[in-house]
Image (cartoon, rainbow, N blue to C red):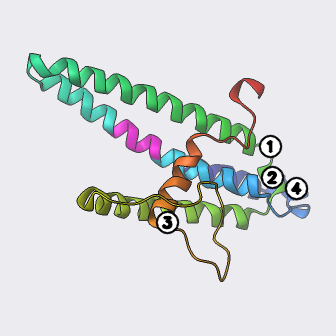
Amino acid sequence: MGCAVLLLSALSPGAGNAMAQQRVPSDDELHSMYCVEVIRTEITLQQHLVDAASEAAGTAQPESREQWLATNAELLQQLAKLQNVLYRLQAYMLPRIPTIDSLALASEIRRAAADVEDSRAIAETCAGAGDCGQPARTEYQQPRPGSASWSNAGLLVRMRGCENPTWIAPSGAL
């Protein structure tokens, strides 16, 4: 939803001059837009996990309550990290969006959403089979026409790479 608002702001009538000067996004900008969608989805999932752990801690027997509370604390720490990453990505992209081809950004958002859906199916398969293997490459790279597509594990690694956006300035440098 947040990405849609950013894209709509780029397409608004007040952005007419910027639209005339739209440019092709860089790989870092495409990667950032992809990661905004991935991290936004991870935050939603993490919030559900926090809620479930909190509920479980509230109804747990005293001997397991401490374990649930510790799990909840870990989930909250991960949620805070994800929210910080999302902020960094949004701060990086916000000033750039008005000058970038919005169709390319929308395409990247759709690709991220499709990858998120694929990752859910992969996670279910991996949980059942217990073996997902490791990919040979870990950096972000879009599959090119005529090349082999990402393996299942490669897709998961690419999505996990969004949690540490090394291509943008550290949060203190913004």
Circle nearer the N terminus (2, 4): 4
Q: What residue is disc 4 on? A: 18
Identify the amino acid type marked 2: Pro
On the image, which quarter does residue 46 sit in? top left
Q: What residue is disc 1 on? A: 95
> Distance from label 3 to label 2 (Cα)?
25 Å
Identify the amino acid type marked 1: Pro
Identify the amino acid type marked 4: Ala
> Distance from label 2 to label 4 (Cα)?
6 Å
The segment highlighted magenta reads 42-48
Circle nearer the N terminus (4, 1): 4
Q: What residue appears at the point 86 percent right and 61 percent down from the top-left corner?
A: 22
Q: What residue appears at the point 69 percent right and 40 percent down from the top-left corner?
A: 166
Residue 10 in the image, given as x and y percentages of width and height = 76, 54
Label at residue 98: 2
Tell whether label 4 touches label 2 (CB within 8 Å): yes
Instruction: Tell me if residue 42 comes above or below residue 76 in the rendering.
Output: below
Secondary structure under the numbered disc 4 in the rendered image: helix
Q: What residue is disc 3 on? A: 114
Q: Is residue 46 left or right of residue 142?
A: left
On the image, which quarter does residue 118 sit in? bottom left
Secondary structure under the numbered disc 1 in the rendered image: loop
